[in-house]
Image (cartoon, rainbow, N blue to C red):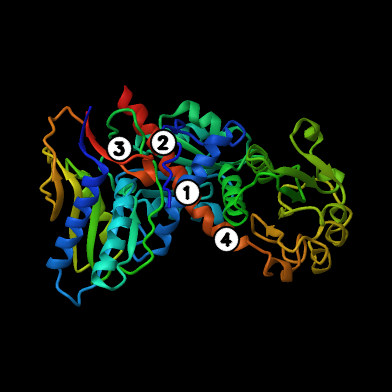
Amino acid sequence: MAIKIKNKHFKWSHKHLLGLRELSAEEITYILDTARGFEQISTRSVKKAPPLRGKVVVNLFFEDSTRTRTSFALAANRLSADVIEFTKKDSSVSKGETLLDTARNLEAMGIDIVVIRHGAGGAAKLLSKNINACVVNAGDGFCEHPTQGLLDVYTIRKIKGTLEGLKIAIVGDIAHSRVARSDMWAMTKLGAEVIFVGPPTLIPAQVKKLPVSVSYSLDEVIEKVDVINMLRIQFERLGGNPFPSIREYSHYFGLTVERMKRAKPDILVMHPGPINRGLEMESEVADGQHSVILEQVTNGLAVRMAVLFLVNQASAQEAAKT
Amino acid sequence: MKVILNSKQIDEILTDLTGRIISEIPPGVDIVVIGIRSRGEVLAQRMSSRLSKKSGKDVPCGTLDITLYRDDLNSPQGDTQPQVRTTEIGFDIDDKIIILVDDVLHTGRSARAAMDALIDLGRPKAIKLAVLVERAGREFPIQADYTGYEADAAPEQLVQVFLTESDDKEEVVIE
């Protein structure tokens, strides 16, 4: 059996992970390959390894999150970092402190990595330009949620072997979805074809400039796709009346048992969570044989460990040079 | 560049190493072979099949990636970047004698990292270090239990092992 020593000379050079749009296919693949090495940490008796020992990771979340925040905290813990949780409700942010002041104060205490989620697009980038610590974007406005994009392609690649040539539908509220954007960048860079599916009111106006096709009918695409990613209807972000009623939305864009009968036999059903059961998809589909929703969560941990490890490596290398 | 071992000599050394391991380990004790990526992995595979043949029972083989346990992650040496790969050990290491295999024993830092990585996986009965080549330059109090060949290399020289499975040629050189 030949043992390949592959891309030996590749070097990860980003001390921040702000989005997938600016990464190359090679860089994305490198993160995915690195994540494979982190998967087994979670399956053994000592669920910890030492690479971030003595480092401090701050979870700076200005928006609610359960899954992503917990996943980052656990990822940091498994790499032996110390984790500080910092949420909007119980911090000075509620007293009117600005993002940069908050971050600079945290940095003055000697933190190494900031994981930030913020309602404003570009918040992570702004932060990265103003502090020395590594910055990892955990979701900024409607722009990007890079680790979700990475864990989605990681999950697909693990099962299908490659993204090359796959047809992937992303269904629902595309306009308000940073997941859709990060997914789109990662999936298309790795060679998949992405179709945005939803009512015209939930498809962003500038979609023509993006490397995707659009369909306003789930029934038209259900038979063609290898992967279907059902987005959550984000009631907290929806203004106005983008669709007449929940029942009508569900009728046209919900993933039902009936619709699944027409899908490819090896289709993968994904959802970034949390699911509105009965709205985006029926419970039988969410818990059915095609669903990889819980695998996504498990893989998210390995991907986030890889990201924290890599940004810290780039930072250590930068420090060694100066 | 000087070739210090050719493929025939490497083969003889592996025969000798596995013979010594069999003769020294009491019968009835389970042994497993674990190689440190990347060259140690190849050597471990060869040793495990020889040990299985000689002892008449299956000697399982695993691969250990020590990147996460390296001591230079936060103080990088030189311009290379360590790459994390998978650890593949599909068996329980509790109460086993582990033959830990690497290509070259030099500073002892890899062996230290490997031992830390192994005890996060369980509690082996013993860990024995087997290396194809050993050279001077230890920085940690570590020595091999089974050494194939002692190379006489100056501190600035590099000892490199090439194996067919990973490098398409088979030799050990000093440069």
The residue positioned farthest toward the front in the image shown: B8
Q: Are marks 1 and 2 on the same chain?
A: yes
- Comparing labels 3 and 1, the label whose residue is closer to the camera: 1
As helix, strand or loop, the secondary structure at mark 1 comes to: helix
Q: In the rendered view, would you say A202 is above or below B46?
A: above
- Under mark 1, the amino acid is Ala
Look at discs 1 and 2 and give the one toward the viewer: 2
Q: Chain of mark 3?
A: B
Question: Alpha-carbon distance for marks 2 and 4?
Answer: 29 Å
Same subunit, labels 3 and 1: the answer reads: no
What number is the disc on residue A35?
1
Measured in 3D between alpha carbons, the distance from the residue under mark 3 to the one under mark 1, in whole angstroms, is 19 Å
Tell me if mark 1 has few (under 14), some (14-19) or many (20+) residues whose alpha carbon lies within 10 angstroms of its own. Answer: many
Name the amino acid type tagged 2: Lys
Q: Earlier in the sequence, mark 2 or mark 4?
A: 2
x, y percent for residue A274: 64, 59
B130 left or right, relative to A60: left
Left or right placement of residue A230 versus residue A44 in this view: right
Q: Which residue is mark 2?
A: A8
Q: Are marks 3 and 1 in contact (CB under 8 Å)?
A: no
Report the chain holding disc 1.
A
The residue labelled by disc 3 is B74
* Residue that lies at the very extreme toward the bottom in this rendered image: B28
